[in-house]
Amino acid sequence: MARVLIVGCGYVGGALATRLLTEGHEVFGLRRDPSALPPGVVGLAGDVSEVEGVGALPGALDSVVYAVGAKQRDEASYRAAYLDGLGHVIRALTEEGQDPSRILFTSSTSVYGQSRGEWVDESSPTHPRSFAGEIMLSAERLLHGSRFPSTVLRLGGIYGPGRTRLIDRVRAGEAVAVAETATYTNRIHRDDAAAAIAHLLTLPDPKATYVGVDEDPADAAEVLAWIAERLGVALVETPASESLPVGSRRCRNAALLDSGFCFDYPTYREGYAALMEAAAAESV
């Protein structure tokens, strides 16, 4: 049994905590409101974005997962959550003399700046085009420069239960933007993201960085058309607009697959089909 601290035990972290608990591990969750933690998780109240927001941590931690979310989508909030917060946790672990076997940070594919449909992987150049990507990349470097063994998982767009915006828009007949040329998108189901983190924590000698996306970096128009067909509704299209994803790149997950990981939802088809089936069951 391992003692695992999940910092930012929210959408992905909560799913990870539930998975680890079923495997018999002891799980601690640090977040601003610990009352929202899954049953069985030992709650810790704290705001990592504050200099003194990290109190005493549980002793003898085997692993730490840093999976926070920013309060808002602006530069100050991102810096406070992902860069400053990570630094505060690293400092707390250092001051307490803790020696976890690994710290895993959930980063983002926004660290890549490629936007013409290029394939990218862990070895590709990182030239972020947004403040979000720049801050994520800085946080990765901070972690890798610390004294702790570290792994970074660069997640694509996360969808899953409660995150059904595309399905809802198509079902409602709202206009969706479709570009004339392919706009490649990269995603991962929440449960696969949690499973990938749990898997990486078990590896004796993981790589420093992994790309966490499913096996199909699909064109956004293809995804929307498939959802519409599955729902049996007409897809209402409009010319491309700012509602389309920023950039267009195809992220390769070969390193994650080579590590022995298997997806429950290898493409958007399996993932969105499961969400639609669950919604249909609830409506009965």
Image: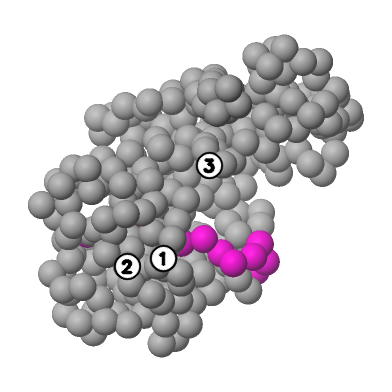
Q: Secondary structure at mark 3?
A: strand
Please tell me whether residue 208 belongs to the stretch shown in magenta. no
Residue 100 at x, y = what percent? 18, 65
Q: In which quarter of the view is residue 178 placed? A: top right
CA distance separating discs 3 and 2: 24 Å
Question: How far apart are the two marked residues, 3 and 1, measured between alpha carbons?
Answer: 23 Å
The residue furthest right is: 239
Determine whether 92 is above or below 38 in the image.
below
Mark found first going from the N terminus, 2 or 1 = 1
Q: Residue at x 60, y 71 (%)?
A: 77
* Dot in front, 3 or 1: 1
> Where is the C terminus found, in terms of image quarters?
top right
Q: Which residue is mark 3?
A: 158
Q: Main secondary structure of the magenta part?
A: loop
Quickly name the residue at label 2: 43
Of callouts 3 and 2, which one flags the residue occurring earlier in the amino acid sequence? 2
Q: Is residue 88 left or right of residue 69?
A: left
The amino acid on which the numbered mark 3 sits, given as a three-letter code, is Ile
> Is residue 143 left or right of 42 when viewed as pictured?
right
Circle 1 residue: 35
Which of pointers 3 and 2 indicates the residue nearer the eye?
2
Residue at the spot x=63%, y=74% of the render? Answer: 76
Question: In whole angstroms, how far apart are the C-alphas of marks 2 and 1?
Answer: 7 Å
Q: Residue at x 59, y 67 (%)?
A: 71
